[in-house]
Image (spheres, rainbow, N blue to C red):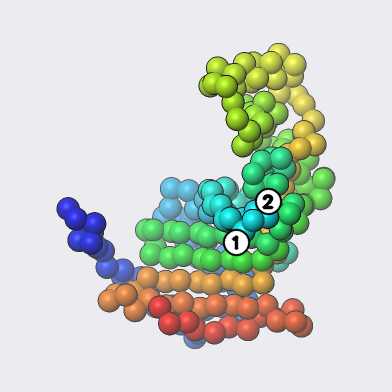
């Protein structure tokens, strides 16, 4: 089938100013609770960063924390995204929940979470994941898959049972949003889009955008 013929219509419930919460975090939590019931992995989000030359990069990460301060994810600080966030802390994330015909776009500034928060999350990970964080020089060139497996084996030998402290090169980031946009797919491509913008007084202003 030719690509232009691959079409689908969207049949989501209306998203309007009368039913959407005035607080974007509460609105996100409302949608997230529904996504948890429908989606295979509702925490999956696309994270976009930019390097010093203005080249963008995007990859999937997992949401691991959410409160009134922002959206938390964890990674290797020395990875490509870690290096890019060190040079330019602005980033954006996108949630796409296909079964609900919904997207949430979030833009803002990132900061590292407190060491204690990273320590607590690292300790909660499965043993294999803790060892993988230590063994993988994320985003660096490897000679082969075997080289990675050997690094993992050495980590396992060094820390049987993965009883290990959090590596200092690994931890969390919090994206503190200044813009949150909710997109609800609707029939005939007449989608609903509500954008929340944080103003100088810390309050949120909400506007409707054309689809």
* Residue nearest the observer in this picture, 27 or 197: 197
Q: Quadrant of the C terminus?
A: bottom left
Q: Which residue is mark 2?
A: 84
Identify the residue at image location x=62%, y=16%. Answer: 150
The residue drawn where x is 50% and y is 71% is 182
Residue appearing at x 70%, y 81% in the figure:
199
The picture quadrant where one finds residue 210 is bottom left
Q: As drawn, which residue projects farthest toward the left? A: 1
| Label 1 sits on residue | 92
Residue depicted at x 60% and y 52%: 63
Q: Position of residue 207 (x, y in %)?
A: 54, 84
Say whether residue 198 is left or right of residue 38.
right
State the separation of the CA atoms marked 1 and 2.
13 Å
Q: Which mark is residue 41?
A: none
Determine the secondary structure under disc 1: strand
- Please state if 148 lies on the left or on the right of 191 as rendered: right
In this rendering, the label closer to the viewer, 1 or 2: 2
Badge 2: residue crowd in 10 Å (few <14, some 14–19, many ≥20): many
Residue 186 location, x and y as percent? 34, 74
Q: Is residue 72 visible?
A: no
- Total labels: the figure holds 2
The secondary element bearing badge 2 is classed as helix
- Label located before the other in sequence (1 or 2): 2
């Amino acid at each position: 089938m030719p690509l232009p013929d691959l079409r689908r219509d969207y049949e989501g419930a209306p998203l309007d100013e009368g039913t959407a919460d005035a607080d974007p975090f509460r609105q996100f939590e409302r949608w997230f609770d529904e996504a948890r019931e429908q989606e295979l992995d509702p925490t999956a989000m696309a994270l976009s960063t930019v390097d010093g030359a203005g080249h963008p990069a995007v990859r999937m990460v997992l949401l691991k924390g959410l409160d009134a301060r922002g959206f938390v994810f964890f990674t290797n600080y020395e990875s490509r995204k870690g290096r890019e966030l060190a040079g330019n802390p602005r980033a954006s994330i996108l949630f796409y929940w296909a079964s609900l015909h919904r997207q949430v776009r979030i833009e803002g500034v990132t900061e590292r979470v407190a060491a204690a928060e990273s320590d607590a999350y690292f300790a909660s990970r499965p043993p294999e994941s803790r060892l993988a964080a230590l063994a993988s020089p994320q985003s660096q060139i490897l000679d082969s898959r075997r080289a990675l497996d050997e690094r993992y084996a050495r980590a396992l030998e060094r820390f049987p049972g993965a009883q290990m402290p959090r590596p200092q090169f690994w931890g969390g980031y919090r994206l503190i949003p200044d813009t949150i946009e909710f997109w609800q797919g609707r029939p005939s491509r007449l989608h609903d889009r509500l954008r929340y913008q944080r103003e100088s007084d810390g309050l949120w202003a909400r506007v409707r955008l054309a689809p």
